Amino acid sequence: MSVHIRFLGGAGTVTGSKYLVEHDGQSLLVDCGLFQGYKQLRLRNRDPLPVLPNHIGAVLLTHAHLDHSGYLPLLAKEGFHGKVWATPATRDLAQILLPDSGHIQEEDAAFANRKGFSKHSPALPLYTESDALQSLKLFRTVPMHQPFEPLKGWTAQFSGAGHILGAASLLLEVGGKRILFSGDLGRPDDALMLAPDAPPAADVVVCESTYGDRDHPDEDVLAELAPALQRVAARGGSAVVPVFAVGRAQALLHAIAELKASGQLPHSLPVYLDSPMAIHSTELFARHLGEHRLNAAQCHAMALVAKMTRTADESKAIARQHGPKVILAASGMATGGRVLHHLVQHLGDHRNMVLLTGYQAPGTRGATLANGGTQLRIHGQDLPVRAEVVQLQSASAHADAGQLMAWLRALPQPPRRVFVTHGDMEASDRLRHRIEAELRWQALVPEHGSTWAV
């Protein structure tokens, strides 16, 4: 019996990662992510999967970011009742991210219904906070490098991928085949996370390609961040920083703490972390010492550098604080969350700044800003963009093209095929071309919904 992979997400796009592996009447999902960005991608979240959820035996998560885990509550709501396997830190982060995702969807739907700007009547969330809490009961944890059996006769093992807390690559052995899923790979030189582990031998590799068409600049995030914040502070403006609550928020807090400690930023410059999810995620770093580069003192400094605003009233109060300030708020691509309210308040003033800190998927508000858009649509209104927009090139938590190639070169032997996934089409195809030209391996970019025998 052959082994098949069905690419139900993360194919030709950087969101919605879902890989259905099937063999001898059994199947499991590697990752279970939400689609984000363009509306035609987001609509896929409401399309039924081509397999009944109760026919899926297990889900294996490479990490907790919503484009890899955020579909889980809906899968469980629609009948999946198997186990969800993850590393302990991924489980801890999912306990924060998934309920928050449901809560935000409920809030956004209620807001749309109140304001009447949704095309649906009524606007409904994909799932609720309660749905997400129910799905968390399915989680089972397994440490890095410890083999486990997600289904009878199937063996799996996580290894470190860097990127964020708990992030892993996954080796799956089934039907005599070894399939390696890279997950999202971090940077070997990341200031926060450890370098990815060397990959094990595999017959087939499913490799991400978020930055498959470019290399990161040599400049580090401190050298790039300092002048931007110095500039906005000097003119009395506010910097609104859309951040991913897991990973990017902590990297920016650590960098700001370092800049204040070295005197490059004044200690008096107010910094706000306006995201309950990011606040809880920041606290996890102290609980998972040894899984990242920070020591206990650095974790403490990172947590103290910002005022943590947990409640909606505290969030609203930030707007009443006069003078320069830095506001870190989710989401990282400005697709939802509290950052939208800060953008509404600050986009129209030329003294202010929007500081983009990582990859902005096409179709997101972050991408509109990064591409020089002069208007931004938020809550049904087109707002003029007068604030300075700065995109940090050095803050990414993803390996770049050269680092992805180095990870692949470290495989003990050439795989029979590499599937290039989790990237925009140009990035994926550029990486595919490099793999074929430089490594002489067979590589392809699978189409969404396609099935391949491995």
Image (tube, grey):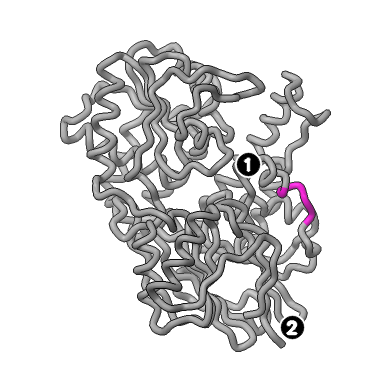
Please say if 85 is above or below 73: below
Q: Does 203 sit left or right of 227 as displayed?
A: right
Q: Dot 1: what SS?
A: loop
Which of the 4 quarters of the picture holds residue 437?
Answer: bottom left
Residue 142 in sight here: no
Contact between marks 2 and 1 (CB within 8 A): the answer is no
Looking at the picture, does residue 382 appear above or below residue 428? above
Q: Position of residue 359 (x, y in %)?
A: 45, 45
Give the residue displayed 53% in from the left and 52% down from the top.
424
Q: Which residue is mark 2?
A: 24
Span highlighted in magenta in the image: 44-48
Judge left or right: residue 295 versus residue 168: left
Q: Quadrant of the N terminus?
A: bottom right
Q: Amino acid at mark 2?
A: Asp
Query: Is any part of residue 422 visible from this angle?
Result: yes
Residue at image mark 1? 38
Sequence-first tag of 2 and 1: 2
Asked if residue 345 is positioned above or below residue 340 in the image, the reply reads above
The quarter of the rendered structure image containing the C terminus is: bottom right
Viewer-proximal residue among 74 and 452: 452
Q: Which circle, 2 or 1, is nearer the viewer?
A: 1
Which type of secondary structure does the marked residue at label 2 adopt? loop
